[in-house]
Amino acid sequence: MGKRNYSVMAEQYWDRVEQLGDTSKEELTIASMDVAKMVTGKEHKNLMRDIRSYVAELAELKIEPGDFFKESFYKDANNQSRPCYNVTKKGCEFIAHKLTGVKGTEFTAKYINRFHDMEDRIRQGIPQKKSSTDERFRIMEMNARSRMAQTYMKLAQVDTLSNTYKNVLVSKASEVLAGEQIIPLPEIPQRRAYSAKEVGDMFGISSNKVGRIANQHNLKQERYGEYRRGKSEHSVKEVDTWVYFETAIPEFERILGIEVA
């Protein structure tokens, strides 16, 4: 019963299309991502699997698959290219005939309404919306840029980072969003820096003792060093680690009473 209903609807639709004639040089299509949304309970990956099987069957029958399904692609949230199909009117009718009952009726009504809307726009001279594939790519690209910029801004709020590196992160966040550098990168002086282990090796003490001395004598200041992100000595995780500038070495010499070359 359901199948008969949506077949009649499709038949009436094609009669209308013939009456309208060719309204556009470019064949109207619906992206497979949108088609999947029209079919209740159907995920895009499953629709893609179905369409691929239809394409293979049509090719075996020497029927041109491109009249029904046109290969294409879109960009996902990570800016990666993913395959999809642009489904023609014939392709939608093909899919509708594979459905039964209420699902078939619902899908047929939705795709007919979609094509009616596109045709009406062409006939009335209303500019067509950008294809759903292009629009999806634009939205996904903006979402990805926004998430990346937010990540940079969150990192810039880490208290242990120096002001220089915070400014670098803010600059990168604005560049990601705008697509060009708006806030200039700060000049980063090339300063020699030593890890706690390297300082400890100079004075024959452990890195832990270097840290304790630095805390006791308030050596963790910008003039003596800064926090930098790097891998932990004891794990693969990245951590904020204090490194010491050349200016800190004389302080250790004074505190320990040892001169190093």
Image (cartoon, grey):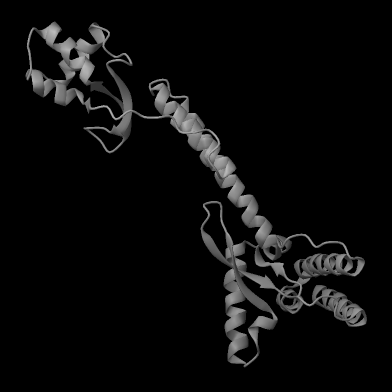
Work out which quarter of the rendered image holds the C terminus and state it.
top left
Residue 29, x across and y down, in percent:
73, 71
Q: In the figure, is residue 204 to the left or right of 194?
A: left
Percent position (x, y) of residue 10?
84, 77
Instruction: Give the vertical position of 146 relative to 198 (above or below).
Output: below
The quadrant the N terminus occupies is: bottom right
Q: Residue at x 79, y 77 (%)?
A: 25
Residue 23 versus residue 62 in the image, above or below: above
Q: What is the quadrant of residue 30 in the picture?
A: bottom right
Q: Residue at x 46, y 27 (%)?
A: 167
Tell which residue pokes out farthest to the bottom in this image: 62
Front-most of residues 114 and 151: 151
Which is more toward the observer, 162 or 246?
Answer: 246
Give left or right: position of 261 versus 159: left
Q: Is residue 171 left or right of residue 210?
A: right
Q: Is residue 118 visible?
A: yes
Picture quadrant where residue 221 is located: top left
- Image point (66%, 77%), residue name: 69
The x, y position of residue 217, in whole percent, is 23, 6
Displayed quadrant of residue 134: bottom right
Q: Is the residue 188 above or below the residue 220 in the image?
A: below
Relative depth, front residue between 106 and 26: 26
Q: Give the number of callouts.
A: 0
Q: Does residue 41 appear in the picture of this structure?
A: no
Q: Position of residue 135 (x, y in %)?
A: 68, 56
